[in-house]
Image: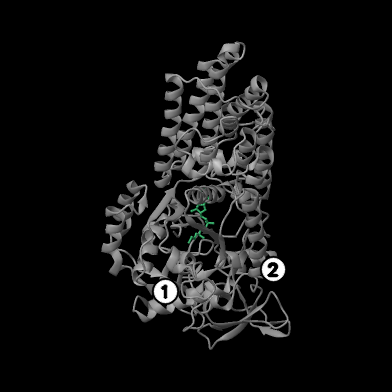
Amino acid sequence: MSKKPFYITTPIYYPSGNPHIGHCYTTVACDSIARFKRMQGYDVMFLTGTDEHGLKIEQKAYEKGVTPKEFVDEVVETFKKLWKYMNIDYDRYIRTTDDYHIETVQKIFKALYDKGYIYKGEYSGKYCTPCESFWTDSQLDENGCCPECHRPVTFAKEEAYFFKMFPFAERIEKLLTETDYLRPKTRATELVNNFIKPGLEDLCVSRTTFKWGVPVTFDEGHVVYVWIDALSNYISALGYMNDKYNDFDKFWSADVHMVAKDIMRFHAIIWPAILMALDLPMPKHLAVHGWITFNGEKMSKSLGNVVDPFVLGERYGCDAIRYHILREMALGADSSFSNEIMINRINADLANGFGNLVSRTVAMADKYFGGTLPTEREADALDEEFKSTVVSVFFEVEKYMDETKIKQALEEIFKAVDRANKYIDETEPWKLGKDESKKAKLATVLYNLLEAIRIISALLSPFMPTTMPKVWEQIGASESDVEYGKLSAFGVLPENVTVHKGEILFPRIDVEKEIEELNSIIKKNMENAQSELSAEEKGESKEIELAPEITIDDFAKVEIRVAKIISAEKVKKSDKLLCLQLDDGMGGRQVVSGIAQYYTPKDLVGKKIQLIANLKPVKLRGVESFGMICAADTPDGVKVIFVDDNIPVGAKIR
Ligand code: MSP
C-alpha cells in the first residue's frame, strides 16, 4: 500500500540578515512534526527556504557593494549551515530566485490577470521605504511615522497592479470561523473583525520602484510585489506550473503551514484568496505561534539582544536547544527566552530527569546482572499501573501531535519520565539487588524501565534526533524496536536484553558559571550594538557645530525654488552622479546631483524637490549642472528633501 502523503512548510525567511533563535523555532518545530509523521509512516514533504527579493535586500546588497544575488547567496549559506547544525532534515529548500519558482510566479500572475482578479491602478499614500510598505493615515503611529519601524514616511504615488480581495471575503470568513484551518482558532475573531468586517482591501501586487523582483511578463518595469512571489513558493516547490518537480498532485494541499503571528494575516486571508482565485484546494491547517522575545523584550539587532543559536548549540548541544525552545512555546502565545530558564530546564528535564533515568537504569542492569537481564519475571499491580501510565502517554502524544501542540506533547512525555523515576524510588532496586530471592523482581523492574525508556526515547526522537540513537545503543534497542507501531505496548525488547553503558547524554550545567558567561556575551553584544548606533538613535542630543551666523539679507541671496524632476539618468563613468532634467517653471534646466548611490531614476521621476536656482553653474564629470537640489545627510545615507505635490513648480521657498 502506498504511504499517505503529508506536506508541511515553514515560512520562507528573508535572507536580509543572519537567522536567529526565532527562525530556528519555526524550523525546529516543523522538523519535529515532519520527523514524527515520518515515524508514523507518512510520505513526508518538508519544505523550507528563503524569500530573496525586494527593496530591502537590494539596498543591503548595495551597501555591501555586491549584487543582490551575491548578497543572498552568502546569507542563504548561513541559513543552510544553521539547519545542518540543528539537524533539520528538510526534503526541499526553495529559493525565490530559483528559475522554476520565477516561472511559476510569472504564470500565476498572468493567470490571475487573465481571470480578471488582477487589475492595473495607482497606489498613493504614505510610504515607508525601509519596510517597503504603504500605510493609511490611521495606521501611522502617534508621531505620524511608520507603525512598524517608527521611521518617517513619505508621500508616494505609483502605478501598480492590484489583486481583488472582495470576491473571496465570504469564503475566507467561513474558512476561519467554521473550519479547523486556523490554529489556534481563537485568533479568527481578530482577523474577521479587523480585516474582513471592515471590507477587505485590494492588495498591491506589483512595484515599479525597485528592480530586484520577479518581472511581470506583460508590463515592463513592474516586478511582482512580495506576497504573490513569496506565498506561491508553497506550490511552485511542488512543481505547480513548472517542470522542475511533479509532485503537486501528490502533496497539495498542505497539511500544515507554520508561521508566527507577524505573518498570520497573509497566510490566513491573502493566501486562501490567491488559492481560491486559482481554483486550488485550501491548505488543511495554519499553525500560528507567538514570538520568542528576550527576557520579555523584542529581539533586535540594534539592541544586541538577539539570541544566536550557534552560540547556544556549541555550549549545550543542538538537542538541548531544540528541546528548550519547543517546550517553552505554546501555539498562539509569546515565549520569553531567558538564559536562566533555559539552563535550569536543561538541568532539570534533560540532565536530572531523562538523562539520569537512562544512566541509572543502564548502570543497575550492568551492576546487578553484568549487563544482560535474566528472563525470570515477577510482576505485581504496581508494575502494571506503571506500564499502563507509560502507554497512555503514547496516545496523548499522538493526539497532541495531530493538533500541532508540540509543547503539550513534550509535557506528556516528561510525565512518563517523572513516573519512571518515581517507579525507581518506589521499587528500590538497590534493595532488591541485595536479596538473592528478589532477582526475578529486580529483573522485572529493570526490564520495565528499559521498556519505558524505549517508548519515551522513540517518542522524543523527532524532537531530539541527535541524542536518541545513543539512548537506543545504551538500552540495547534495535532500529525495529523503536518503530512507531511498537510504542503502544511493553514487551518489545528481548527478555534477555543486553545494555551498554555509554556517555552521559546531557551533562549537568554549572548554572552560575554559564549564566555569568552567557550574560557577558549578551552584554558585549549590547555594548557593540549601542556603540554602532548614532548619538541621535541613542536618544542623546548631539553637539552640532554650526556654520558662522548670517543675516536675513545673507539668506535672501539664496534663491530656492520648487522644481519637478522630469527625467534622470546616471552620469557615464560615475557611481555617484545622476543627471536630472527639471521643470523649474522657467523653461527647464539640468542639474547634476551626487545621489546615485541612494536613488534610482524611478525613485525620482515625477517628484518635486527644492532647487538652489541661482548657484553658479559647474561641470561635473564633464556634464554641466545649473544649480543644486536640497538633501539631508542621515545615518541611512543621503535623503532628498521632497516637496508636497500640491506646491506648484517655480514657487519660491523662503
Ligand atoms: N519572508 C516572509 C515570509 C514569507 S512566507 C511565504 C517573512 N520572513 S521573515 O524572515 O521575517 O520570517 C518571519 C518568520 O520567522 C516568522 O513568521 C517566524 O516563523 C520566524 N520568526 C522570526 N523571528 C521570530 C521570533 N522572534 N520568534 C518566533 N518566530 C520568529 O516574514
User: What x and y, as percent, mark residue 231?
Assistant: 46, 65
Q: Amino acid at mark 1?
A: Asn
Is 175 on the left-hand or right-hand side of 154? left
Q: Residue furthest bottom?
A: 587
Image point 69% across, 42% down: which residue? 314
Q: Quadrant of residue 599?
A: bottom right
Q: Quadrant of the N terminus?
A: bottom left
Give the mark count. 2
Q: Amino acid at mark 2?
A: Val
Secondary structure state at the residue bearing disc 1: loop
Q: Quadrant of residue 166?
A: bottom left
Front position in the image: 418 or 543? 418
Number of residues whose C-alpha sits closer than 10 Å to that of mark 2, classed few (under 14), some (14–19) or many (20 or more): few
Give the spatial CA distance, label 2 vs label 1: 39 Å
Q: Is residue 348 above or below residue 480?
A: above
Front position in the image: 514 or 384? 384
User: What x and y, as percent, mark residue 208?
Assistant: 50, 76
User: What x and y, as percent, mark residue 153?
Assistant: 48, 62
User: Label 1, on which residue?
Assistant: 646
Front position in the image: 451 or 141? 451
User: Label 2, on which residue?
Assistant: 66
Res. 242 in view: yes
Q: Quadrant of residue 630?
A: bottom right
Image point 63% across, 69% down: which residue? 68
User: What x and y, as percent, mark residue 529?
Assistant: 65, 47
